[in-house]
Amino acid sequence: MTVQEAPQDEGTPPPEPSQDERPPQDQDGQQAQEGRSAKNTDDDFDEDALGQTANVINNFFAEVSAQKATFGITGGPAVRSVSGRLDRGDVERALARFVRPRGFDRALTALRERHVVVLVGDEGIGKWTSGVALLAEAGLSPERITVFSPGLDLDGLLAVSFKKDRVYLVHDWIEGKVENNVRRFGLDTLSTRLTRAGAHLVITLNRAETRQGFEAFEIGWEPPNPLEVLGARLGRARLSHDEAGLPEEVATLRSPRQVVELAEQMLSGSQSPQEIMADLCGGTVTTWFDTRPKRSEVLAVAALAFVYGLPERVFERLLVRLTTIADEVERQGAERERRSVGENLPQSRRLWNDGNPLIGLSADAGEPRVVFRSPHHREQVILQLYRVYGYGVLEPLRQWVRELADDLPEVQVQVAAGLALLARKRPEEVRESFLIPWAGGLVQERMAAASTLSMMCADDTTAAVAFTTALSWVENAGQPQAMTAALAFAGGLSIRYPAETVDWLWYLSLRGVRVSNVAQRALTLMFQTAAERDDEALTGLRLLVRHLDRDLSEGMEPQRARRALQAVLGVLAADRLEREESLMAWLLLSQPASAKAIGTLWAWTLYNAHHRSDAVRALCRTLRHLGEQAGATGATAAAEALGVAVWSALPEAAAVLVRRAINHACAGGHVRRDSPPAKHVVLALLNAGSRQIPS
């Protein structure tokens, strides 16, 4: 199912109509039944919720730096796709002030000799940047690095046609369960093929130790010297000046990201190095938990870890509910105590208004919001809760978090962000206690599971967990789980795994009615969000063309063919995200290279008799939007390029029918031919290429 690179040739002309692709004339009753079934599945897909969640998720991914940690999650650079290409500018930015870790020279030698090397080590120690640096030195001034998906197994790597003098990267490889002798043979074969092509490949792998017998390929990786990284950021003169006052813990930091953040905060001068280190490494949080805080205080910080940054009144309501659940768990089997309403009234707001070392209030957004005093505290509190406490705290927390799947959207997003932090250290807890129950639940629970998987994509390691979890729901796991997987692929997974997202949403779009409906709308949303990120929509369109060409050319049963074309038509007819503007019109104007792929997709839908009228309406609407953009340079040229792609893909007989349908639709008012700009756009489409407008 995985496609590695978008094809340069987006497709071949559709063949003559086959009986399977024509709507059967005697199946009206069956078609009506399909329509009734589709109408009964509205509860499977909360379009408003998914749109809002996807928008929030994409905003989060765009602002994942420590300074702009929307949800109290600290990170580093903006989240990147795990597959695609890195150009020279990307490489130069990644390697600015790069410090070589120990073992770099040995890895470079192995890469030059065998053309493939595997960097093995813990997550977060800089393997990605080291891999980029190795390829930059091994290749002959590479203009780009091709990044493969970590889900590509050894057989998939062996199937790649490596190109001469190209360099490739697989980060956080999901190596799968393969016998050692088979893996060794595969790596040997891979090395031979790369050597013959003159290409180089670096694989990074999250594993504690290298395997015996793989010394020729696997190199145990260590983070760079933290003091050297700090010096590269501060400058050697500044580091020499401050070195005497640095805490000893600086030399033990294993995450280059933490060292960089330490340098940035030291440069700002807002805190002493000791205070910065206490926040970065969790000393402040650990000290607080060591004081054995009261139950009410523990529940307050536990609640804040999962519903961070909410208005004080909302946080208070949620904390009361958590406390109630905790009381019920504590008193299981015992008669509930009766207490007068007027007795022992708790002064709950003192928990965060009386100088709590962890909790405070922020009034940046007007209404007071409950936050942690340091953005690092959120993750550290979550880890301490699961390290220090047992059933009495964790079981109420589990029940409470599961309930929040049906709360306010802002609450749901915060819960997903909290669970994503928990998944960094306890992925099985998140899977078993939350994701699996939610994935088979009601629509809001499925949305919560999808949002959590999307938030997990903010981190390199948990992104791989999110991907494999979604894949486990695609097949043989039940319809609700498959729908949840489709929702997840429309969110953060589409940023991390753009090619795989198209593959799997296409596959799910061909499933039964309920799964297909959700997958089709998720596929549309994926393209709406991808269009806002450089040229990702163009890559996705080319992959969609490849799937459609392959499946329809090879022949499909009528219902599956209809679903395939309906999925494509949903993308073609879509508006931009949160704008009433044709997505295809915008892409044709902003990314002219998309015309060939868009035209091929439209040719298939126009060619099919069952979908032709809907395709013509969508095309006319796109032309109207292009006409409205007549003041924008290239509107007519975009329509002509689209026409060339459509007419070159359609057989002559079908082209005549389609041209007449477009003329009829334009005359009917879908595109106002009396409007000069619109008229020029329509004529540009119809006159494109060598064919003439039918009389």
Image: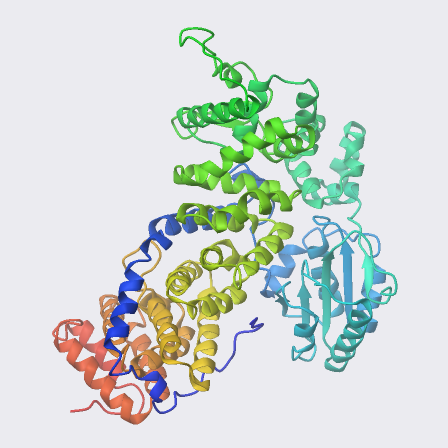
The percent position of residue 370, horizontal first and vertical second, equals: 48, 26
Above or below for 5 versus 325: below
As rendered, which of 118 and 340 lies closer to the eye?
340
As rendered, which of 23 and 298 lies closer to the eye?
23
The percent position of residue 434, horizontal first and vertical second, equals: 54, 43
- Count of marks, rendered view: 0
As rendered, which of 302 and 269 lies closer to the eye?
302
Quarter the N terminus occupies: bottom right
Quarter the C terminus occupies: bottom left
Apparent side of residue 113 relative to residue 550 in the rendered image (left or right): right
Report the residue at 47% width, 82% height from top.
Answer: 550
The percent position of residue 53, horizontal first and vertical second, equals: 42, 48
Report the residue at 40% width, 10% height from top.
Answer: 341
The percent position of residue 431, horizontal first and vertical second, equals: 59, 47
User: In which quarter of the view is residue 383 placed?
Assistant: top right
**Outermost residue to the top:** 343
Apparent side of residue 521 relative to residue 324 in the rendered image (left or right): left
As rendered, which of 468 and 691 lies closer to the eye?
468
Above or below for 496 versus 449: below
Asked if one can make out residue 10 in the rendered structure from this viewpoint, the answer is no
Above or below for 41 versus 191: above
Report the residue at 52% width, 57% height from top.
Answer: 493
